[in-house]
Amino acid sequence: MGVLNVTPDSFHADSRINGIEAALKQASKMQGEGAEWIDIGGESTRPGADPVSIDEEKIRVIPIIEAVRRVYPEIGISVDTRRPEVARLALEAGANLINDVSGLRDPEMVELVLSTGAGVCIMHMQGVPKSMQDRPQYTEARTDVANELLHRAHALIESGHPSERICLDPGIGFGKRLEDNLALLSDADWIRGPHQLPVLWGVSRKSMFRDLLNRTETSERLAGTLGVAAHAQKVGVDILRVHDVAEHVDLGRTLAELEARR
């Protein structure tokens, strides 16, 4: 899943896109490199970020989704939003998946998912982006995160939503300390639950690599990101949300070829 940020303030500056033409160029590049999904977002949710208005978010993302769907009809489109109104318009514009970083806290988002049958990624976030990294605390990170995500997923399933149209994201860096992030990334099976739900990891160039490797600039964090990607392939993660599609595809293919020859 390639990241397409239609924002002026996303944490990794090289991922910021402005305008339909630039968005289509980036979507073409990522698809050509092997992305099966494009994740389009119009609100930065980096630590400390201020929210944008619903109107501004709609202006940023809906024309981009329409354009990407028109030009690339076969690509999967994910809309990265916390707002039910934005998600509804995104689905109407051609999105296939709602990537809700707030973890379906809004009952209106739950109703939208159920009424449309849309694919949904439920992500864990402790608090809100503005203050989530102030003092995150967990009794036990994996247990706490799994309990919250599986509770929301099972509520959807019990209401008739197909389990195969749900994936779970532990929310690396969203109200997490380094030790929490590392625990959540140890493997993937702890989060799947009895329905064996698909798992998405979004770790690309995040601040955990500042804390782990002393890499202050996001431009210095590709190697650490690829290290996690190699581990993700080993433990069976289903979707990787990344800024650098070609590098991840090359890594994955190389590891697969080596494994096939063991």
Image (tube, rainbow, N blue to C red):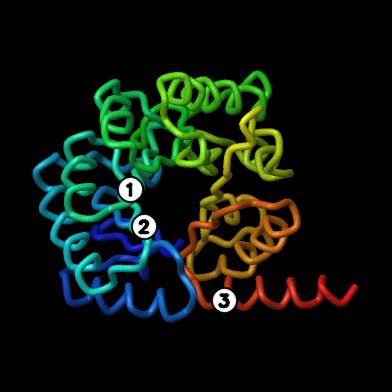
Whole-percent x and y of residue 193?
A: 64, 29
Image check: 90 left or right of 185?
left
**Three-letter amino acid code of the residue under disc 1:** Asp
Q: CA distance from mark 1 to mark 2?
A: 6 Å
Q: Which residue is label 2 attached to?
A: 39
Marked residue nearer the N-terminal end (3 or 1) = 1
**Three-letter amino acid code of the residue under disc 3:** Glu
Image check: 13 left or right of 134?
left
Q: The residue tagged with tag 1: helix, strand or loop? A: strand
Q: Which mark is residue 80?
A: 1
- Identify the residue at horizontal 51%, vertical 41% (top origin): 164
Instruction: For label 1, count other residues whose C-alpha is less than 10 Å away and answer few (under 14), some (14-19) or many (20+).
Output: many
- Identify the residue at horizontal 55%, vertical 69% (top origin): 220
Q: Are marks 2 and 3 in contact (CB under 8 Å)?
A: no
Q: Are marks 1 and 2 in contact (CB under 8 Å)?
A: yes
Q: Which residue is label 3 attached to?
A: 247
Question: Is 194 or 64 nearer to us in this picture?
Answer: 194
Say which quarter of the image contains residue 261. bottom right
Q: CA distance from mark 2 to mark 3?
A: 17 Å
Instruction: For label 2, count other residues whose C-alpha is less than 10 Å away and answer few (under 14), some (14-19) or many (20+).
Output: many
**Three-letter amino acid code of the residue under disc 2:** Asp
Above or below residue 60? Residue 2 is below
- Identify the residue at horizontal 55%, vertical 35% (top origin): 176
Image check: 120 left or right of 106?
right
Q: CA distance from mark 3 to mark 1?
A: 23 Å
Number of labelled discs?
3
Say which quarter of the image contains residue 120. top left
Instruction: For label 3, count other residues whose C-alpha is less than 10 Å away and answer few (under 14), some (14-19) or many (20+).
Output: some
Whole-percent x and y of residue 85?
A: 17, 36
Say which quarter of the image contains residue 83. top left
Q: The residue tagged with tag 3: helix, strand or loop? A: helix
Marked residue nearer the N-terminal end (1 or 2) = 2
